[in-house]
Image: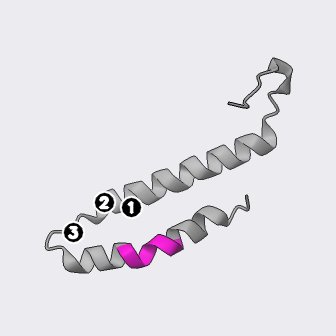
Amino acid sequence: MSLFTPLIWILIVVPFIVLAVFRSEKVNLKYLGLFVLYFLTDSYIQHLSKLYFDLEWIEIRLDW
């Protein structure tokens, strides 16, 4: 996964968000901003933790 992948996902969803904003009467952009911030933070934490934190010494098998 590239570091640009979460941004591309958000850009794919932006037209639907714009459509919803224009069609609704009350728009609270605070929650939309919090969602985008949470999504980017979660995506980058997952991506960077796989790169920089090697947990093979615990010998956990994550093959569900």
Quadrant hosting residue 40: bottom right
**Circle 1 SS class:** helix
User: Which residue is at a point 18% across and 73% down the rendered structure image?
Assistant: 24
The main secondary structure of the magenta stretch is helix
Identify the residue position indicated by label 2 in the image. 30
Identify the residue position indicated by label 3 in the image. 27
Identify the residue position indicated by label 1 in the image. 33
Quadrant where the C terminus sits is top right
Disc ID at residue 41: none
Inspect the magenta stretch and tell me whether residue 12 lies in it.
yes
Q: Which residues are magenta?
A: 11-16
Rounded to the nearest angstrom, the CA distance separating label 1 from label 2 is 5 Å
Label 3 amino acid? Answer: Val
Mark 3, mark 2: which one is toward the viewer? Answer: 3
Question: Crowding at label 3, few (<14), some or many (≥20) Cα neighbours within 10 Å?
Answer: few
Label 2 amino acid? Answer: Lys
Quadrant hosting residue 2: bottom right
Inspect the magenta stretch and tell me whether residue 52 lies in it.
no
